[in-house]
Image: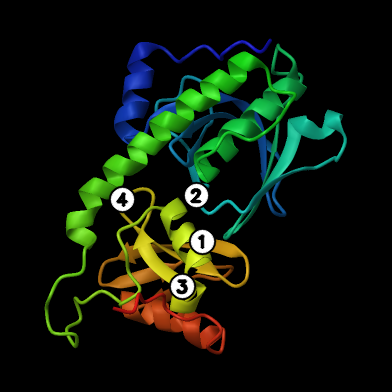
Amino acid sequence: PEETPQPAPRQIFQERQRITSLPLYFQGYLSVRHSRCHQRVYWTELRGTVLFFYDDKKAPKYSQKLDISTLTSATNVYPDENGSAQFILTLSSGELELKVNFKITSCDFKLVGKEWKGFILTVTELSVPPDESLLPEQLRRMHEVLEKEKERRMMLNNSSSASFTRKTPPSNTLTALPECSYAVSRQEAMKMLERNTSCGNLILRPGSDNKSYAITIRAPHIKHYKVVSKGTCYLLELERQVILPSLQDVVNYFVTETQGNLKPYVIQT
C-alpha cells in the first residue's frame, strides 16, 4: 500500500496555506511537461482544483500553478495497466503530461499514479472514479476529499451569490450582468445545460477560485473556459488570449465566433 507523503515542516505548511488559501488534498513528486516543453520534476500539491508546483519540497512559495477546473479528460499515455503512472490532463487551455518518477517515489509508482489521477478526477468531477484497482484506504481518502471539496464549493457559492446575483440597474448600464449569468457551481451549470437544452447552451458563472468568472458551454460536449478580470477588461483564456471590455462582450464573442451555434442560457418566465 502507498504511504501518504510526509507533510512539509509545520512552518512551511502554514506559509503555503496562507499563500494559496486552499485546502491540501494530495502531494508528492511529479514529472511535469507542458506541450512542447521539457520535462521537469516538481514537488506538487493538489489544493482545491489547483495544482501548485514547487521547485523544492521545502520551498514555501510555489513556482507555478495550474487551475484544473476546466479538465475535460485524464488519459493514460499507455493504455495498458503499466501506463497508469503517466497520464495527460486535457484542459481548455491545453494539455499537461504528468508522470510519477519511479526513481524518486519509494513506493509502488504505478499505484501512486492511479492515486494522483483518482484525486484529480474526484475534485474536478465531484465524484470518486470507479477504479477497481484502487485500494480501500485510497477510496476512503478520496471520499473524504470529495466531501471537503463539496463543502468548499458550497461555501464559495454562498459567499459569491450575494455579489453575483443579478442586480436591478437599468439594462443599458455597463455594470449589468449578462442574462445568462447564474450563481451556480461548475457541476450545477453542467446539469442546467443538460436538462434544459431549449433554454440555450452557454452559461456565465463564478470561477472556482471565487475571484474570476467562467463560461460553461454545451456544443455538444461540455467545456469550460476561464474569464479573468484585468482592471476594466476581461481576459478570456483560449489558445490565444482574448481581451474584452465587458462580460457581455465575452458572451457576445462566443456567440459570434460560433456563428450563433452558442446561445446564452436564459430561463423563460
Q: Mark 1 and 2 residues: CB-CB less than 8 Å, in contact? A: yes
Q: Which residue is the site of mark 4?
A: 210
- Position of residue 139 in the picture relative to residue 101 (left or right): left
Q: Secondary structure at mark 4?
A: loop
| Kind of residue at disc 4 | Asn
In the rendered image, which quarter is residue 8 located in? top left
Q: Position of residue 167 (x, y in %)?
A: 15, 70
Q: Which mark is residue 224?
A: 1
Q: Earlier in the sequence, mark 2 or mark 4?
A: 2
Is disc 2 surrounded by few (<14), some (14 to 19) or many (20+) residues within 10 Å?
Answer: many
x 30%, y 59%: residue:
183
Q: CA distance from mark 2 to mark 4?
A: 12 Å
Q: Which residue is the site of mark 2?
A: 69
Examine the rendered structure and indicate whether residue 79 appears above or below residue 239.
Answer: above
| Kind of residue at disc 3 | Leu
Q: Earlier in the sequence, mark 1 or mark 2?
A: 2
Q: Secondary structure at mark 3?
A: strand
Q: Secondary structure at mark 2?
A: loop
Q: Quadrant of the C terminus?
A: bottom left
Q: Is residue 220 visible?
A: yes
Q: Quadrant of the N terminus?
A: top right
**Which one is nearer the viewer's eye here, 62 or 254?**
254
Q: Which residue is the site of mark 3?
A: 202
Outermost residue, front side? 269
Mark whose residue sits in front, 1 or 3: 3
